[in-house]
């Protein structure tokens, strides 16, 4: 490293590996090191110079600035080597990061990764199966059920149940929206023929000014491509289900006739 330059994540992981040569890079540090698409942009995931690098080690260590350790739990067959650094397998890295995140952030992360085709239900099942008896496995089981059902949150499951009970057909869950060959968003429920997207909590419920600006940009792109976005809150779906169904029917009739 040149003096005065800020270290990159790769350099910090190399330094961590040199400090604890028998350690394994795990958690969010491993996800970022593998370069899994867009992970650094997820809400409240601290991939920056101030965040410690997390390693699994065979036994306790004296604390070091910028390093965190956990007791070794990764099987030898799940270890990989990247530029001389021992790092956990990508499937387990995702599972590990999701398991230690608070559930609201985990749900947001799963939704983000699924919508960008970063992970599939099979990928999450693979990571969950190999995660064994670590803390947080219950979270992974829940995320896998949600993704397997085509939903990325409990609110989406409620919305799907409403549509099914009302006999409304012609929709796809958690559907990527492509404009000019590029995925610009993923709709919680998409009626492609009617160009209608039904969202739970809308595009602006992701937190932070930058995220809000990005979401508003995607909303403009969708509108220019002819899509109409119909947002609902969690409370509307739970407390006023009949009104939600009526609004969706009216929007479908308007979009189909228009």
Image: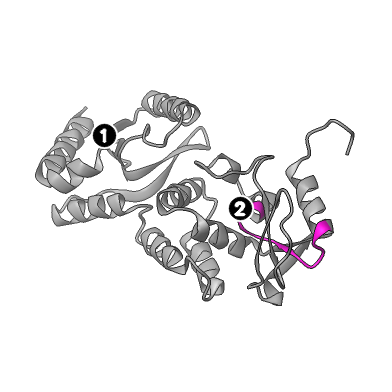
Who's the residue at 34% across and 45% down the image?
Answer: 188
**Cβ–Cβ below 8 Å for labels 2 and 1?**
no
Residue 257 image point, x, y percent: 18, 31
Mark 2: which secondary structure?
A: helix
Write the start and end of the magenta stretch as one range.
19-29
Position of 189 compared to 177: left or right?
Answer: left
Q: In which quarter of the image is residue 232?
A: top left
Which residue, given by chain and number where applicable, does mark 1 sit on? Answer: 230
- For the residues labelled 2 and 1, the Cα–Cα distance comes to 34 Å
* Relative height, residue 107 to residue 59 (above, below): above
Mark 1 burial class by Cα count in 10 Å: few <14, some 14-19, many 20+: some
Reading the image, the residue beneath label 2 is: 28
Q: Nearer the viewer, residue 217 or 206?
A: 206
Residue 201 covered by magenta stretch: no
Q: Which of 254 and 198 is in front in this view?
A: 198
Q: Horizontal and vertical percent for residue 150?
A: 36, 56
Secondary structure found at label 1: strand
Q: Which of 94 and 256 is in front in this view?
A: 94
> Which residue extends farthest front?
62
- Callout in the foreground (2, 1): 2
Q: Which of 25 and 180 is in front in this view?
A: 25
Look at the picture and state if 175 lies above or below 59: above
Residue 110 lies, in percent from the top left, at 46, 52
Q: Residue at x 72, y 73 (%)?
A: 58
Image mark count: 2
Question: Split into 4 quadrants, where in the image is the N terminus?
Answer: top right
Left-right relation of 112 to 66: left
Please give left or right for residue 78 compared with residue 180 in the image: right
Image quarter where the C terminus lies is top left
Residue at the spot x=89%, y=34% of the render? Answer: 2
Q: Note whether 162 is above or below 252 in the view shown.
A: below
**Residue 194 at x, y percent in the picture:** 27, 37
């Amino acid at each position: 490293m040149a003096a005065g330059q800020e270290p990159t994540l790769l350099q910090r992981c190399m330094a961590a590996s040199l400090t604890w040569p028998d350690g394994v890079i795990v958690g969010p540090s491993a996800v970022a090191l593998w370069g899994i698409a867009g992970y650094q942009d997820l809400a409240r995931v601290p991939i920056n110079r101030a965040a410690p690098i997390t390693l699994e080690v065979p036994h306790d260590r004296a604390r070091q600035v910028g390093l965190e350790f956990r007791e070794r739990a990764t099987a030898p067959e799940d270890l990989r080597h990247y530029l001389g650094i021992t790092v956990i397998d990508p499937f387990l890295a995702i599972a590990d990061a999701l398991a230690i995140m608070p559930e609201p952030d985990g749900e947001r992360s799963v939704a983000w990764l699924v919508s960008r085709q970063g992970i599939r239900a099979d990928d999450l099942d693979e990571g969950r199966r190999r995660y064994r008896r670590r803390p947080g496995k219950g979270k992974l089981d829940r995320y896998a059920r949600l993704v397997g059902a085509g939903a990325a949150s409990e609110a989406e499951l409620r919305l799907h149940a409403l549509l099914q009970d009302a006999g409304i057909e012609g929709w796809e869950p958690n559907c990527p929206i492509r404009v000019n060959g590029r995925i610009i968003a993923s709709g919680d429920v998409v009626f492609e023929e009617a160009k209608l997207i039904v969202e739970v909590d809308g595009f602006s419920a992701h937190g932070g000014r930058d995220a809000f600006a990005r979401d508003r940009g995607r909303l403009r792109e969708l509108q220019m491509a002819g899509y109409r976005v119909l947002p609902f809150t969690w409370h509307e779906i739970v407390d006023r289900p009949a009104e939600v169904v009526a609004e969706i029917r009216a929007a479908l009739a308007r979009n189909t006739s228009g």
